[in-house]
Image: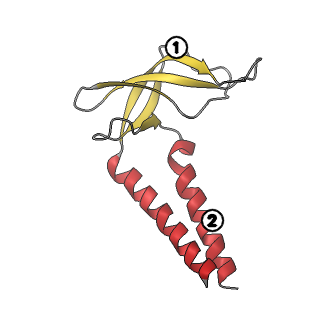
Amino acid sequence: MLLTWAGYIGLGIAAVLLLLDLARFRKTEGKVLGWERSDGDEGPNASHAPRIRYRTAIGMTREFRSCVFVWTKPLPLVGSMMPVRYHPTIPWLHGVDRWTHRWIAPVFFGLTGAAFVWFGSL
């Protein structure tokens, strides 16, 4: 029974994360200013994080370093544009608009919650 309730909580967290993302975040394009290599990574397969500048819908300019590293080769060129998602009223909530950035947390909590509900009902 406890496992089932934990599953329902996980499903609830997934739903809240998804709804907050869909309702509040805005999309725009950001300019790649440069790339930062992750600590400890050396060689041709090192991962990099982009530093991006973007403009909000009300004209404010913001800049950030993505917290998610990119392993694709070749890296997008400095000066190229990347999709960005941002929260209009919370300046530190922003990131590169990729599937993994948007869906990883809701998918994790949703699948974990569903598994707990299923195992708890056995």
Give neighbour class at mark 2: few <14, some 14-19, many 20+ (Cα, 10 Å). some
Q: Is residue 93 left or right of residue 77?
A: left
At a point 51% along the width and 30% down the height, the residue shown is 66
Above or below, 12 relative to 46:
below
Residue type at the position of mark 2: Thr
Q: Is residue 106 left or right of residue 29?
A: right
User: Can you tell which mark lies on residue 78?
Assistant: 1
In front: mark 1 or mark 2? 2
Above or below, 5 relative to 43:
below
Question: x and y percent of residue 27 in the render?
Answer: 37, 37
- Residue closest to the far left: 58
Residue type at the position of mark 1: Val
From mark 1 to mark 2, how far is it between C-alphas?
A: 38 Å
**Where does the C terminus fall, quadrant-wise?**
bottom right
Question: x and y percent of residue 87 in the render?
Answer: 34, 41
Q: Front-most of 96 and 63? A: 63
Q: Front-most of 16 and 103? A: 16
For label 2, the residue is 112
**Tag 2, which secondary structure?**
helix
**Where does the N terminus fall, quadrant-wise?**
bottom right
At a point 34% along the width and 53% down the height, the residue shown is 23
Question: x and y percent of residue 20 in the render?
Answer: 38, 54
Q: Is residue 91 left or right of residue 48?
A: left
Above or below, 106 relative to 101:
below
Image quadrant where residue 42 sits? top right
At a point 32% along the width and 40% down the height, the residue shown is 90
| Comes first in the chain, label 1 or label 2 | 1
**Tag 1, which secondary structure?**
loop
Question: x and y percent of residue 101 in the render?
Answer: 53, 43
Query: For the image shown, how many numbered marks are present on the structure?
Result: 2
